[in-house]
Image: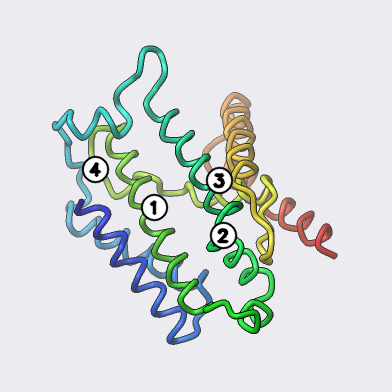
Amino acid sequence: AAGLLTGLVVGLFNGLVVTRLRIPSFLVTLGMLGIAQGAAMWITNTSPVPILDNNFNNPFGSANAGQIPVLVFWTIAALVLGHILLRKTRFGRQALATGGNEPAARFSGVNTQRLKVTVLVLSALLASVAGMLYAGRLQSGRFQWGQGDELSVIASVVIGGTNLFGGSASVTGAVTGSLLVGLINNGLILMGLEYSQQVVARSSLIILAVALTGRRKQ
């Protein structure tokens, strides 16, 4: 509950800063990333915090249902619910319309300011759930969990068909993209590349994917 509450507060703060101060959401969330990491380092004194409660660990990543890791079920649930929300609801259609052409969406009657706040709150809540899954899987809390995943996540959604310029997105495509990026990451490891070289390769992949997305839009 504390994790979700933290996500709610962070998302609401991001949303209000974006809509009231008219700062691009990318910059606001990037700044909040630094604040959150610094706060986590401060609270934990940069040391891992063991989680010994199996009532938390098991449903959030440590348990298996037969031979199937519970994280697979979390992934399926996120895929189904995300697809329904984006493609089958008014909220999803309004979000796509706002991302594609905000003035047109506003003139069509969409409360774009409220929608932006809602999207950022939802994003922060989902980030909280992801953090809880990290903690449950690794049975500890540490400020470094998830650090550096930003590049892989961006690459996954872009490869999956999400247009960073707005207007198009695909939940199923993002999941497919994440599987492809996972294969690429494993390939880089098997090739014996150092971590720094892997970062260069992933960053180059993002630039290529964004460039191809821009050409498709043109």
Q: Give the number of the disc on residue 92.
A: 2
Residue type at mark 3 is Ser
Identify the residue shown where x is 30% and y is 23%. 63
Residue type at mark 2 is Gly
Residue 77 found in image quarter: top left
Residue type at mark 4 is Gly
Residue type at mark 1 is Ala
Q: Earlier in the sequence, mark 1 or mark 2?
A: 2
Disc 4 is placed on an element classified as: strand
Distance from the alpha carbon under mark 2 to that under mark 4: 33 Å
Please provide percent x and percent y for residue 81.
Answer: 48, 44
Seen in the picture, residue 82 relative to 16 is either above or below; the reply is above
Q: Which is more foreground, mark 1 or mark 2?
A: 2
Q: Residue furthest bottom?
A: 21
The quadrant of the image that shows the C terminus is bottom right
Q: Residue furthest left?
A: 52
Relative to residue 146, is residue 200 drawn left or right?
Answer: right
Q: Which residue is mark 1?
A: 127
Q: Which residue is mark 3?
A: 152
Disc 3 is placed on an element classified as: helix
Q: Earlier in the sequence, mark 2 or mark 3?
A: 2
User: Within 10 Å of the Cα at label 4, are there few (<14), some (14-19), or many (20+) other Cα atoms?
Assistant: some
Q: Which is more foreground, mark 1 or mark 4?
A: 1
Residue 107 found in image quarter: bottom right
Q: Earlier in the sequence, mark 4 or mark 3?
A: 4
Q: Nearer the viewer, residue 187 or 177?
A: 177
